């Protein structure tokens, strides 16, 4: 970790004011976080993505880099979220026989779960007095980032607020699934993966792959179908509500 920090310090003078600085900071924050994560005992409530976010935020403050400048410089990283999500089709293909065996429950479950995930967020936000922008920002909070960003922009939400909601949702989902699944007798990796993917998007899917490849495949399926269903339904609901 000290070696990473020393190399970053040596590069900073050459990268200042260029998109490369944002890229280096992002990658360095993640590399440091995955080194720290095992030393913390791999807590479910504090995954590497959260650690990396905190480290990156601290770096921006220390280096006096405006978050808008960073976001613009690191925009290509956000672009890569789309291809990364599509690449999850590979584990889906390898577990296709398991998916075919449960296609009926999946077809019934995903639309209901995706609808409920959006409804309870909207209802709670409205009950607490949130304005339209806040409601539009958190409505797609259970959708994977590439799709959720497009939905939020379409319905008038704030992308920075959405990203915070996505991070919180993914962490809370993995925490609750880990704490409650065994206690209520849910041990089937297919169900665990589908639950993590539907509710916890990419963060939940990462956790599912830690459980097993089967859980990861079902999480990928749940995440993809939830994003597709929400992208079609939510803008229509917000438009006519």
Image (cartoon, helix red, strand yellow):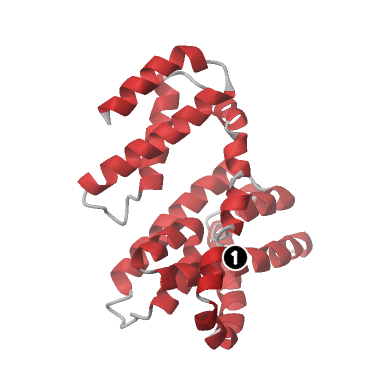
Q: Residue furthest right?
A: 240
Residue in view at x 37 percent, y 38 percent: 31
* Mark 1 closeness class: few <14, some 14–19, many ≥20 residues within 10 Å: many
- Percent position (x, y) of residue 208? 41, 65
For label 1, the SS is helix
Point out the image quarter for the C terminus: bottom right
Give 197 or 123, whichever is nearer the viewer.
Answer: 197
Residue 25 image point, x, y percent: 45, 29
Q: Relative to 44, say whether 156 is above or below.
A: above
Where's the N terminus, which quadrant?
top left
Tell me what residue is drawn at x 62 percent, y 30 percent: 72
Near-viewer residue (12 or 131)? 12
Left or right of residue 156: residue 129: left
Residue 37 % position (x, y) = 28, 46
The answer to which image quadrant residue 104 occupies is bottom right
Give the camera-side residue of 130 and 203: 203
- Tag 1 residue: 224
Q: Residue furthest front?
A: 94
Q: Residue 62: tell me if it is visible.
A: yes
Whether residue 140 is visible, yes or no, is: no
Instruction: Count the labels in the image.
Output: 1
- 23 in relation to 138, above or below: above
Horizontal and vertical percent position of residue 3 = 29, 26
Q: Is residue 194 left or right of residue 133?
A: left
**Vertical position of residue 154 compared to residue 160: above or below:** below
Residue shown at 44% from the left, 35% from the top: 27
């Amino acid at each position: 970790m000290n070696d990473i920090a020393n190399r970053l310090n040596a590069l900073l003078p050459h990268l200042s004011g260029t998109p490369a600085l944002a890229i280096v900071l992002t990658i360095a924050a993640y590399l440091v976080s995955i080194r720290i994560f095992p030393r913390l005992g791999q807590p479910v409530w504090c995954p590497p993505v959260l650690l990396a976010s905190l480290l990156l935020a601290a770096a921006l403050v220390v280096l006096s880099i405006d978050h808008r400048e960073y976001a613009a410089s690191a925009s290509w990283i956000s672009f890569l979220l789309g291809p990364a999500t599509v690449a999850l089709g590979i584990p889906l293909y390898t577990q296709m026989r398991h998916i075919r065996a449960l296609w009926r429950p999946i077809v019934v479950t995903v639309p209901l779960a995706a609808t409920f995930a959006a409804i309870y967020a909207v209802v709670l936000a409205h009950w607490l007095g949130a304005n339209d922008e806040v409601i539009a920002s958190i409505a797609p909070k259970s959708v994977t980032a590439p799709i959720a960003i497009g939905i939020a922009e379409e319905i008038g939400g704030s992308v920075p607020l959405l990203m915070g909601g996505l991070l919180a949702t993914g962490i809370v989902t993995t925490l609750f699934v880990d704490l409650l699944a065994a206690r209520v007798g849910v041990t089937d990796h297919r169900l665990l993966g589908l639950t993590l993917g539907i509710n916890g998007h990419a963060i939940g899917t990462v956790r599912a792959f830690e459980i097993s490849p089967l859980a990861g495949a079902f999480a990928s399926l749940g995440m993809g179908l939830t994003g597709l269903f929400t992208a079609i339904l939510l803008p229509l609901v917000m438009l006519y509500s």
